[in-house]
Amino acid sequence: MTDPQYPQAPVAAPSPTWNSRFDFYNTYGHPSASAHGAAAFKQLSFGERFRLTANGPAFFFGPIYFAIKGPWRKGLSLFGVAVAISALIGVIELAFDISFPAAGFGAAIGVLYSTAANWAYYQHVAYGSTSWNPFEGVPLLRARK
């Protein structure tokens, strides 16, 4: 039986490289979702924290990575955000006759894809998520105690 919020059935089990990420997500949810999860996240080594929150292939391949792994809707949403930000930067550059470095913009968009990829893939595999929201289940503002 599937959760009514997620109409698609969950997909096959993840590969062994994803198991440590999925174990953390199954136990604590997103690292910023609760104080308990944040405390457990802080106990991890730098490498473990980096692997949990960043994804190298997603940094370099962006929406293609999302399409291949499954949560293509989230990748397409992030692509739309990237296009909107690019258009806004273009307007600012024209209006103020300034130039932003293209590499900086490319890296920022890569980081956006990289940080959203692991959680989006977890939502896709564990719950069969078909949402267009790439930050589904991620609290943007959480009260700190």
Image (cartoon, rainbow, N blue to C red):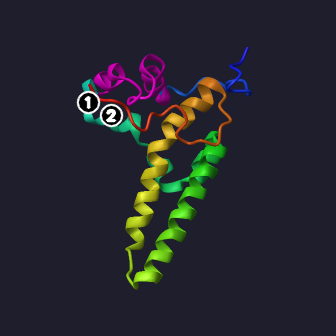
Q: Amino acid at mark 1?
A: Ser
| Residue lying at the far top of the rendered structure | 1
Left or right: residue 83 compared with residue 45:
right
Q: Is residue 120 above or below residue 23?
A: below
Q: CA distance from mark 2 to mark 1?
A: 6 Å
What residue do we see at 68% from left, 27% from top? 6
Q: In the image shown, does 32 or 56 lie closer to the viewer?
A: 32
Q: Amino acid at mark 2?
A: Arg
Left or right: residue 103 compared with residue 76:
left
Left or right: residue 84 compared with residue 35:
right
Q: Residues within 10 Å of mark 1 (few under 14, many from 20)?
A: few
Q: In the image shown, does 62 or 80 lie closer to the viewer?
A: 80
Q: Is residue 129 above or below residue 98?
A: above
Q: Is residue 87 above or below residue 74?
A: below
What residue do we see at 32% from left, 26% from top? 38
Which quadrant holds the C terminus?
top left
Q: Which residues are magenta?
A: 17-41
Residue 125: percent from left, percent from top: 61, 28
Residue 87: percent from left, percent from top: 54, 70
- The residue carrying mark 2 is 49
- The residue carrying mark 1 is 45
What residue do we see at 44% from left, 47% from top? 56
